Amino acid sequence: MKKTALHPRHLQLKARMVPFAGFEMPVSYSGITQEHMAVRQAAGIFDVSHMGEFFVEGPDALPFLEYVTTNYVAGLDVGQAQYSCMLREHGGIVDDLLVYCLGEDRYMMVVNAANIDKDFEHLREQSHRFNVNLLNASEVWSLMAVQGPKALEIVQKLTETDLSEIPYYHFDFVALNSVEEALISNTGYTGAGGFEIYVPQEVALHTWDILMEAGASAGLVPCGLGARDTLRLEKGYCLYGQDIDETTTPLEAGLSWIVKFQKDFLGKEALLQQKAQGITRKLVGLVLHEKAIPRTGYSVCDTEGKPIGRITSGAMSPVLGLPIALAYVSSDYSSPGSRLKVSVRERLAEAEVKKLPFL
């Protein structure tokens, strides 16, 4: 089991540790609901160092990334990031990821922890006809996320750079107190605002400590994977391995906004064919009208009890106080307001399709 550079702090804070994507990671410290509400109301800090970082450099870096990702990379300015995904030829999603434009012919890709080896091999397989250099630097960098309405106030204490000047989905290299090389990105997976902070692993513990100290008076709390999951679910963000994978396409998953058909990319023909034929299933948001938690894999049925889909992610929303879920359902039942049922412990709970995000 791998450990991040911040593992000693999690043990000191008596976090509940669990296996995740090959790493031993904190699922919670004080409790998932408490951590969730801290992020919505003040701020939380997450160790997300298990994520992977790849560097793509060379004369063909841009055309290579245009081919292997679905979003429009050429539209990025230096200091800008974008959400995107990689596809197989049949249109299935290899991974969803972030692309950072570091400079001319130089980019960084941030990928999901469970997919690091698979993604890098996929990139290597596709790189042969491009003049490009690939580097897997996942074991060099650590990543912390400070999220919530007070995140700016907290992180700003540690740098002279005006962080309010970094727009959403942009980043800058800044001196963070005594940490001379920190990439601070106005991004996150919570929908609460905040920053993701990349630092070399050797200064990860120090960075965590100065962030915790800076946030003490603002209510900053350490948060685990449990709160990260409920936070992203309230915003309708997909989780790879549950809501998307190589058996799903971005068109089915509601990610057509990151697919640019104006360019050529791996998997384009399959998506064009699917688009022409019509999508038979869609990822939708569901709200249950009963206190029943919709777990991954539960069946979704029509009002007569006929199965028409399945739950991919589900939880009780701490903010809404209602059970919420993401589910693939037949396209005929995907319109907001559609009444459905979820099979929970051998009974059918009333549910309704809601337009995402929930919150």
Image (cartoon, rainbow, N blue to C red):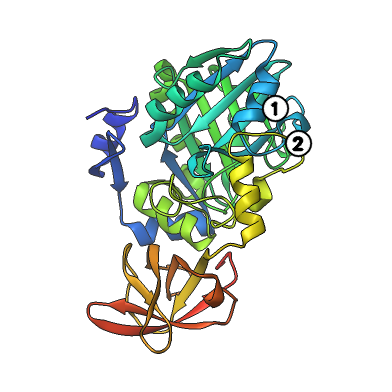
Q: Amino acid at mark 2?
A: Glu
Quarter of the picture containing the N terminus is top left
Q: Label 1: how many residues lie within 10 Å, few (<14), some (14-19) or many (20+)? A: some
Q: Residues within 10 Å of mark 2 (few under 14, many from 20)?
A: few
Where residue 357 is drawn, which disc sits there?
none
Q: Nearer the viewer, mark 1 or mark 2?
A: 2
Q: What is the quadrant of residue 350 in the picture? A: bottom left
> Which amino acid, by three-letter code, is at mark 1?
Thr
Look at 63% across and 35% down and name the residue there.
156
Q: Mark 1 near mark 2, Cβ–Cβ under 8 Å? A: yes
Q: Residue at x 43, y 49 (%)?
A: 247
Q: Which residue is mark 2?
A: 165
Which image quarter: residue 49? top left
Under tag 1, what secondary structure?
loop
Q: Name the residue at 33% across, 62% down.
A: 296
Q: Indicate the quadrant where residue 243 lies.
A: bottom left
* Left or right: where 238 falls relative to 75: left
- CA distance separating discs 1 and 2: 9 Å
Horizontal and vertical percent for residue 73? Answer: 71, 31
Return the mark for residue 161: 1
Quarter containing the C terminus = bottom right
Local secondary structure at mark 2: helix
In front of the other: 60 or 111: 60
Q: Is residue 92 visible?
A: yes
Percent coordinates x, y for residue 252 in the rendering: 55, 57
**Residue 191 % position (x, y):** 57, 54
Q: With respect to residue 193, does 143 lie above or below?
A: above
